[in-house]
Each structure stands twice: as structure tokens, then as C-alpha cells.
Amino acid sequence: MAGKVRTKTRGPQPAPQRPRSRFGYDHRWWGVAPEPRDVPLSYWEATRRPLPCLAFVTPLLLLYEFGVIWLGGASSEAYRTGADAWIRQFLANLGLRDQWFLPLVLLASLLAWHAVDSRGWRFSPGALVGMALESLVLAIALIGLSRVVDFGFSRLEPIPARMLALDSSSMLHPLIPLVGFLGAGVYEEALFRLVLVPFLFGVLRILQAPGLVASTFAMTTSALLFSLAHHAGTPGEMFTWFAFIFRWLAGVYFAWVFVARGFGIAVGTHCAYDVIVGWLGWHF
């Protein structure tokens, strides 16, 4: 009697994990496969993590907060920059008026984010130096973009890119614009990139929008609101097409830096650009 031949039947194979996307930070936000936790992170990966971003942003945040208190004294609220003032006004309407509440929320959010999806609590201090240098390089690249936009608008509106910077000659103290630029870099990136980009992306993904569509919409819409915000309220900047278009492009640029290189470098790039153009007056 011939023996029976057994055939092995394979069960359902697990779906291969999608590679980690360059858009965003982790699988919880952007729906991509998590990275193995036992693999050492390179500089390019580590600098996108919350803990290095926290270490990099904290000195800038403290310089701004203590600078506002030192320059303004009892009237320090008058020295707060746009996004910081908008958020504080919103919090004041909710009864949250402590001057340290907002910076503590920002720092605690980064710390909690790292604790939830931690890849370890150590990183090389040299990464912070690299982040500073990278921010400087990206800021210089944005200055180059501003020159291109300036050239394109030169025959339409004779308003060069340097007119977008704050005129420090009108200030009573030379450090007032510097402190303001640090605050703008931290709080505008926190509002328009750290909060708004993931929020818009998440909403569209819930609505079943493709990832590319959701990411593109999140970046461009947050940039549009970033540009419009500079012309809203009192006092708002006079509207010009050059200022509006350039800030929209700059907002997309900062959003790209945010999703590709992380919150810390986005803040550093924003601060470096504002300081170089607005405070030092270097326009290349």
C-alpha cells in the first residue's frame, strides 16, 4: 500500500512592515512601522527625537522668557511676540494667567512624548552642536530663497526681503528684537508646526485621505495660516503680496524642516533666520 504524501500548507503570511517614512517622527503619528528599539540611532534619527529637541529648545525658550521679564519688568506682557501673545490671550480667557504655564506645558509635552515612545534617555551632547550648525545652514538656505522671491517680485512690489524683518532702530533697547526673534522661533514653530501640522494630518488620515495628500495639505495649510497670522489682529503688518507669498513659502520650508529634521531644528532654523536677517541685518 503506497504511503500517503503529506503536503505542508502555509498559513497566512504576516504583511510586511512598511518602511519608516521620512515624514514625521513615529508610527503613532504617521501610521508607519516602528523602528527596532535595540538599534543605535544615528545623528539624523536622534535629532528628530523629543529628548534632544527638548534639550536644544529649552535654552532658547528660557532666554526668551527671562529676556522678556528683564526688559519689560512689570509691563513684560507688552514685549511678548505674536504667537506667544496669541496663545497667552487664549489661555487668559480660560483663566490660565500664570506666566510660566505656557513654557512649562511646551516642555512637559516634549518630555511626555519622549516618555510614551522612548528610545532611551541618552544622546550625545555633540548632537546639539550639530543641530545648531544644521539650523544655521538651513537658515542661510532660506535667505537664498528669500533673495529668489525678492528678485521675482522686484518689478511688482519694490519691497525687499529685509523689509520683513523688524526694524531694530525703532526699539528702545537693542536686545528687544533679539529676544522677540527667539520667542517667535520657539512659539511660532510650536503652534504652526508642532501642533497644527500633526493635527491637520491626523484629521485627514481619519477621513481616509491618502498619506501624500494629507501630508501635503497639512504642510501647505499650516504655512498659509502662518503667513496670514502676520497680517491679522492689531497691530498687524500691512498686507503686500511679497510678504504674504514669501511667508507662505517660508512656512512650507519650516514645515518641511519640521517633518524631515524635527521640531528642534525647525526652531533653530527659524530663530537663526530671524536673528541673521532681522537683528544682524545680514541679507547677503
Image (cartoon, rainbow, N blue to C red):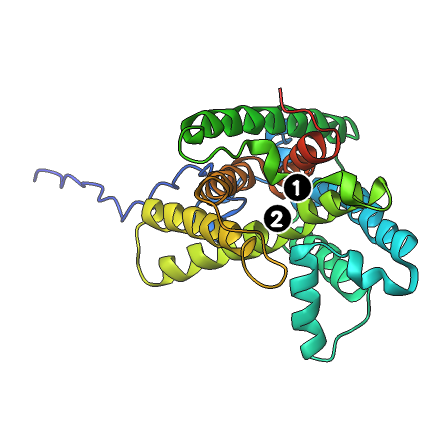
Whole-percent x, y for residue 237 in the image: 58, 52
Q: Residue at x 43, y 54 (%)?
A: 201
- Residue 100 found in image quarter: bottom right
Residue 219 in the image: x percent, y percent?
44, 47
Q: Give, as a three-letter code, the residue at label 2.
A: Glu
Residue at the (18%, 40%) spot, across then down = 7
Q: Are marks 1 and 2 in contact (CB under 8 Å)?
A: yes
Q: Quadrant of residue 200?
A: bottom left
Quarter of the N terminus within the rendering: top left
Residue identifier under label 2:
189
Q: Which residue is mark 1?
A: 267
Asked whether, in this view, residue 122 is left or right of residue 94, the answer is right
Q: Secondary structure at mark 1?
A: helix
Q: Is residue 224 above or below residue 206?
A: above
- Can residue 55 be seen by looking at this rendering? no
In the image as oriented, which residue stretches furthest toward the left? 1
How many angstroms separate mark 1 from mark 2 (CA)? 6 Å
